[in-house]
Image: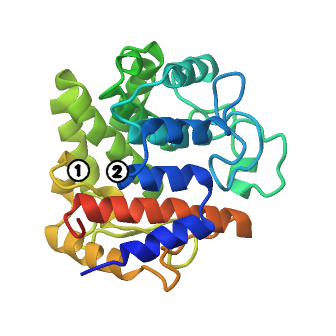
Amino acid sequence: MTIDLAAARTFMATHARILDRRRFLRLLGESGPGELLAALDSYRNGDGGYGWGAEPDLRSPESQPGGALHAFEAFADAAPATTERAAALCDWLGSVSLPDGGLPFAFPVTEPAGCASFWVEADSDSSSLHITAAVTAEAHRVARHDPAVARHPWLSRATEFCLDAIEAQDRPSHALELRYSLGFLDALAEADPGRRTQALALIDRLGAAIPDSGSLHVGGGAEDEMMRPLDFAPVPGRPVRSVVRPAAVAADLERLAGLQQEDGGWPVEWASASPAAALEWRGWITVRAVSILRANSVIG
């Protein structure tokens, strides 16, 4: 099981957006946090949130929860460096959260051109466990090294919302919601020792929805679009890895390594709203694939 890292580097230089090129170089230890954070700034709005295509299928300029997700991802990649931008993003999230502490899947999209319909048509008046769990999980990753994020009241409220929403369900309503709920619980188990027992119990309960294959079809997506073992449990040694069979993880690592294309990048396995978004996703996916394969000791 091998990949061509040099070809991946060439793909990123040729096709990826600057943000993901900086994330890739940071992953390889070839670029500092300052360059990555500078690249992220181009997606930032004056309110402290992020838009402008930070989420490739949501190209509208206004700040969105989807933009916050990708911003926290970059803040986590910049560790151990911190930036006041992270706490400012928490301030924005606190200012736009709904009364129950959750985030809507998206706020009204001001420029729908090039945006996926599920963003444009989202209910902006109801909290979404899917997006709130995704954003909050990434924020907890940042909180590991950034005390300002760890103690921010928005993070506390969002965490409570996610826990209450997960506790109230018999099982997640969608494969993506399951993925992000498990990711949130996995992050919380490490971030909050007082919540660890609760988080582990919920991981076990939600994990029962994952079949032995480790894969679930994504309702409403492409016919062959799946959440796979490494979507649910990408990193070894984490609590969520316990609910995915080792054989399924091993098979998915083989599959992931084998997906590298002739141009050096990894493919998009879902429908994108535009050719530009599809290419931008390929850069993001290539960073993710190399990160997962390194974390699992498939490559050095």
Q: Is residue 141 visible?
A: yes
- The amino acid at mark 2 is Gly
Please report the residue visible at 36 percent of the width from the left and 67 percent of the height from the top. 228
Q: Position of residue 193 (x, y in %)?
A: 17, 24
Left/right of residue 224 with respect to residue 15 in the rendered view:
left
Q: Residue beneath label 1, please?
A: 240
Q: Nearer the viewer, residue 155 or 199?
A: 155
Q: Position of residue 207 (x, y in %)?
A: 25, 54
Q: Position of residue 135 (x, y in %)?
A: 48, 37
Q: Quadrant of the C terminus?
A: bottom left
Q: Residues within 10 Å of mark 1 (few under 14, many from 20)?
A: many
Left/right of residue 210 with respect to residue 134 in the rendered view:
left
Q: Residue furthest bottom?
A: 262
- The amino acid at mark 1 is Val
Q: Secondary structure at mark 1?
A: helix
Q: Nearer the viewer, residue 146 or 163?
A: 146
Of badges 1 and 2, the one in the foreground is: 2
Q: Quadrant of residue 103?
A: top right
Q: Residues within 10 Å of mark 2 (few under 14, many from 20)?
A: few
Q: Position of residue 166 (x, y in %)?
A: 37, 37
Q: Quadrant of the N terminus?
A: bottom left
Please report the residue visible at 45 percent of the width from the left and 77 percent of the height from the top. 7
Discs 1, 2 touching: Cβ within 8 Å: no
Q: Residue beneath label 2, please?
A: 29
Q: Secondary structure at mark 2?
A: loop
Left/right of residue 204 with respect to residue 270 in the rendered view:
left
